[in-house]
Amino acid sequence: MDNKNKFFSDEVLNKALKILGVILLFLAVLFMASQFSELWSKIIGAFKAVIAPVILAWLISLIIYPIIRLLEKRGVGPRGFSATIVYFGTVIILVLTVIYLAPYIIDQIEQFFDNDVPKITAYFQTDFRTDFILGTDIFDWIAGTISESTIIEDGISSMIDSLTKSLSGTLVRLFVVLLILPVFLFYYLLDYELVNDSLRSIIPLKYEKDASDLGNRLNQTVGAYVRGQLILMFSIGAVATIIYKLIGLKYFFVFGMIVGVTNIIPYFGAIIAMVPVVAYAIITKDTGPNPFLVVLVNLVLQTIEGNIFQPVIMGKQLQIHPLLIIVSILFFGSLFGALGVIFASPIAATIRVLIQFYNEKRNTRTTNEINAPPLL
C-alpha cells in the first residue's frame, strides 16, 4: 500500500474521527460552562471559603496531634480528654503570648508615632533634600511640581479606595475563618483517625494501599516542615531581637518580630524584613546605629538562618526546589491572598511529596514491565 492510500486507511480515519470527537466534546463543555459563569464564580467562591479553614485545621493538627498521641501513649485518655487538654493548652499559650507581647508592641508603636514620625517628616524636608543625588534645585523643582499637581492626592485616594474594598472582603473572610476554625479543628482532632479512614474509604480498593502510603508521607513530611518552620520563626526572631538590641536599634523588639514573622515566606521574607529596618536606620543615622552596620547585621542573620538554623531545624530531607516555592507563592498568593503567601511553603511541600510519590510509582511500574516474562 502506498503512502497516499495508507493516509486514507480506515485506521487513520477512525483515529482522526475520535480526536475530532474529543475536541468537539471539549469545546461543547467549555461552551456550556461559559453559559453558567455566574454559577461557577459562586462555586469557586464557596470552594475558597471552605478550603482555607480546612487547610489551616490540617496544618495546625500536624503540629499538635503528635502531642495528643504522646499523651495517649503515657496513659492520658480517652481521646476526648487528651484532645481537650492539648487544645485548650494551645489556646492558653497563645493568649498568654499575646498578653505578654502586646504591651511591648503597643508601647514601641506609640513611641514611633509620637517621637519618630515628626523626625522622619523633618528628614525628608531637610537632610534628604540636602543629600539628594541630583542636587537641591532639581529636588525643589520635583517637589514643587508634585505639590502643584494632584498626583499624590489622587494616588492616595485611589489607594485608600482599593484598600477599603479589599480590606472589607479580607476581614469578612478572616472573621469567618477565625469563627469556624476552632470548632472545626477540635472535632478534627477528636476524630482524627475516623476522618482519615472515611477519606480513604471513598478510594477504590486497588488504590487504597497507595493512598494510605501517600497520606502518611504527607502527614510526616508536611508536619515536620510546619513544626520546623515554626521553631525556625521563633529562633531567628529571637536572635534578631537580641542583635538589634546590642547594636542600639531603638525599636529592636518590633523589628525582631518582623524578621521572625516574615521568615515564613522563603527567600522574599528576608528582603521584606530588611527594608523597614534599613530605611529607619538611614533616617535616624545621627542618633541610631550606622545603616551599613544594620545591613551587615541582616546579612549575618540571613547567613545564620540559611547555614545553621535551616539545616539543623528543618533537615536536608525537607529541601524544596526554589522554583517550586516561588511559583507556589505567586499562585497561591493570587488565589488566597495573604494566607496563600504564608502557607505556600507547606503547600509546596505537599506538591513535592505528590511528585515524588508519582515518580516512584512510575519507576516501579516501568521496572515491573521490563522484568515481566515475555508472553508466549
Image (cartoon, rainbow, N blue to C red):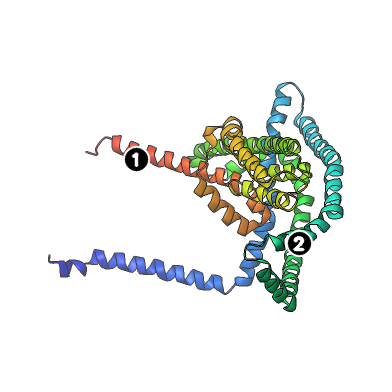
Count the numbered circles shown: 2
Report the front residue among 79 and 150.
150
Disc 2 residue type? Thr
- Quarter occupied by the C terminus: top left
In the rendered view, tell whether residue 189 sits above or below residue 153.
Answer: above
| Distance CA(mark 1)–CA(mark 2) | 72 Å
Residue 272, percent across and down?
Answer: 65, 50
- Secondary structure beneath disc 1? helix
In the picture, the quarter occupied by the N terminus is bottom left
Disc ID at residue 7: none
Q: Residue at x 61, y 35 (%)?
A: 304
Task: Name the amino acid type tagged 1.
Answer: Thr
Disc 2 target residue: 126
The image shows residue 220 at horizontal and vertical percentages of 59, 34
Q: Position of residue 212 (x, y in %)?
A: 55, 37
Q: Position of residue 58 (x, y in %)?
A: 66, 43
Can residue 263 be seen?
no
Q: Which residue is mark 1?
A: 366
> Which type of secondary structure does the marked residue at label 2 adopt?
loop
Q: Residue at x 70, y 38 (%)?
A: 240
The residue lying toward the viewer, choosing from 131 and 311, is 131
Mark 1 Cα within 10 Å, few/some/many (few <14, many 20+)? few
Residue at (48%, 44%) from the top-left corner? 355
Residue 33 vs residue 154, the one in the foreground: 154
Give the label, 1 or 2, closer to the camera: 2
Residue 337 visible in the current orientation = yes
Quarter-wise, where is residue 232 in the image? top right
Most extreme residue toward the top, as rendered? Answer: 74
Which tag, 1 or 2, sits closer to the chain's start?
2
Q: Is residue 276 above or below residue 201?
A: below
Disc 2 residue crowd, few under 14, some 14–19, many 20+, Cα 10 Å: few
